[in-house]
Amino acid sequence: MGINGKYKVIVIGGSAGSFPVIVSILNQLNSNFQIPIVMCLHRLKQFRHGFVEALSLQSNIKIIEPDDKTSIKPGCAYLAPANYHLLAELGYTFALSTDEMHKFSRPSIDLTFETFSYAYREKMVGIILSGANNDGATGLLKCKKRGGLTIIQNPKEASVKTMVEGCLNLFQPDMVLNTNEIIRTINS
Amino acid sequence: MNTIDIEIDIRDIKSFVQFFKEKYAYDFSDYALSSFKRRLQRLLHINQLKELAELQKKIISNEIHFEKVVEEITVNTTEMFRDPGFWKKLKDTVVPNILKEKQGRIKIWHAACSSGEEVYSMAIVLKELGVLEKAEIIATDINEEVMQRAKRGIYSKQTLQVNTANYKSYSNDALPDFNQYYHENDEYTIQLERSLISGVKFQRFDLVKGSAFDSFDLILLRNVMIYFNFELQEKVTELVYSSLNNNGILALGTKETISWTKASENFTLKDPEDKIYRKNIRN
Ligand SMILES: C[S@@+](CC[C@H](N)C(=O)[O-])C[C@H]1O[C@@H](n2cnc3c(N)ncnc32)[C@H](O)[C@@H]1O
């Protein structure tokens, strides 16, 4: 059985080097893609504008920077707003927080993954892409422990390997894939 | 150990909140769960405890002071000119519009002022408009300790980089540098110009329990509603509604919204990007 039907959310974390991968994924989603995608990408907070637009250029689905308490809906991709942590609440709504940086990051991938895996349990797919720090590994492990499907970008393909290797140092994720395979998998 | 590895059960959170509510005058029942849980994880972590029951014991025995717990449970992070674009609008349109409609003093309420950066930012905006003396500012927070910091106006040099960059972006580089507003205090800290806030009244105020105490032309309620659940957001929206003059302005954090509250019918969203609302005139 494919991803569709079995999972209720796909959460993607990435940092340095992940932008082109994210763009490829968004541009090649099936046109009727129905699982909400939540993206927690490290970025400079000065870039408040333009990021959503850059991702939206050729994306097949709508990209939104959610306000606090927005409900998480199929057919949308959500981007963590700059300078906030992006969390999930139990009723499948977003929650934002400005609390301390975690591993020098806000938004922090660990925090997004931890709260999403808590709210969605085995209904979550977690994907970690290229990145230059260690944020994300602990969160992806949480996803694994709570029964979710865990995927990392192949370190051979990732332009900066630190983040995916951080995951591999902690545990063996369910799948280690190149960008094309990630796209094929989530479209399945 | 990582804070996120500390597992806390929701039932334990509920009973801890109940304990706190009965014993002390704080009610966290309607705080949004996800971030509240993280605060508790953090509290356990920094006190090297495994579960909330242990924390509760330490609070009862006064090994950990309950006010300290309140300080840690609430999120106090703030910046000068956080969201510079918002402050620019405040200066270019919001405040001038209020001044046009209003003779005499304008009244401003910072409803969750934290360590004061927001209050100083406002004072600077008003000063640059030449109307600081015309403003009556009240700054409140649930937490006495952070307000003490606000009154002292001494901040770590580490904050300068962000604050200076925000100020630059707010002023489009058109004004002299941010450093006109502070001087060095010691090796590690700076002292903001205290004359900026000499007219500000600081007061403890809990948005959960408080009721309207005055009416204002402008209320800043920024980055505090994100920590509240729907019910509490509803209640606080009503509170600010009854604390605003007709046509009064409410500014939320840029990612906050009151659009799903009932009380929002009585507001017009003037600026969707920076979440600036205006209270409608009552018929
Ligand atoms: C993240 S800070 C926001 C500071 C500032 N407004 C800003 O946007 O930068 C949140 C503040 O809300 C305060 N707070 C939390 N719960 C509160 C309550 N029930 N009543 C009043 N203030 C509260 C906290 O003490 C903290 O100082």
Image (cartoon, coloured by chain):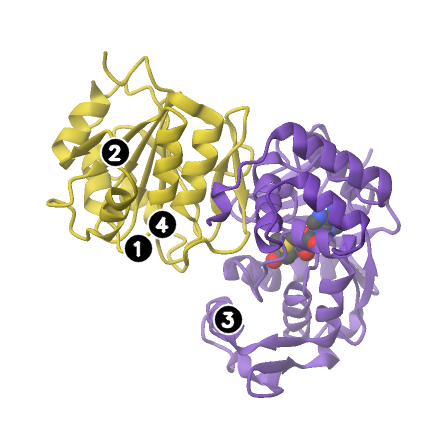
Give the letter of the purple chain: B
Q: Chain of mark 4?
A: A
* Mark before the other along the chain sequence, 2 or 4: 4
- Picture quarter with the C terminus of chain B: top right
Q: Looking at the picture, tell me which residue is in the foreground, A78 or B49.
A: B49
Marks 1/4: CA–CA distance:
6 Å
Instruction: Pinpoint residue B66: horizontal percent, then vertical percent.
Output: 77, 52
Is there CB contact under 8 Å for labels 2 and 4? no
The three-letter code of the residue at mark 3 reads Ser
Q: How many marks?
A: 4
Q: Is residue B180 above or below residue B132?
A: below
Query: Residue A135 got which mark?
Result: 4
For chain A, what colour was chosen?
yellow
Are tags 3 and 1 found on a single chain?
no
Q: Which residue is mark 3?
A: B171
Give the residue drawn at x 28%, y 43%. A167
Q: Of marks 2 and 1, which one's residue comes earlier in the chain?
A: 1
CB contact under 8 Å: marks 1 and 4:
yes
The residue pinned by badge 1 equals A133
Under circle 2, the secondary element is loop
Q: Which residue is mark 2?
A: A173
Task: Give the distance between the C-alpha atoms of the residues marked 2 and 1, in whole angstroms.
Answer: 18 Å
Question: Which numbered mark, 4 or 3, is in the foreground of this view?
Answer: 4
Q: Amino acid at mark 1?
A: Asn
A145, above or below B64, in the image: above
Give the residue drawn at x 62%, y 52%: B75
Query: Considering depth in this image, is B60 or B74 the residue closer to the camera?
Result: B60
Q: What is the chain identity of the residue bearing mark 2?
A: A
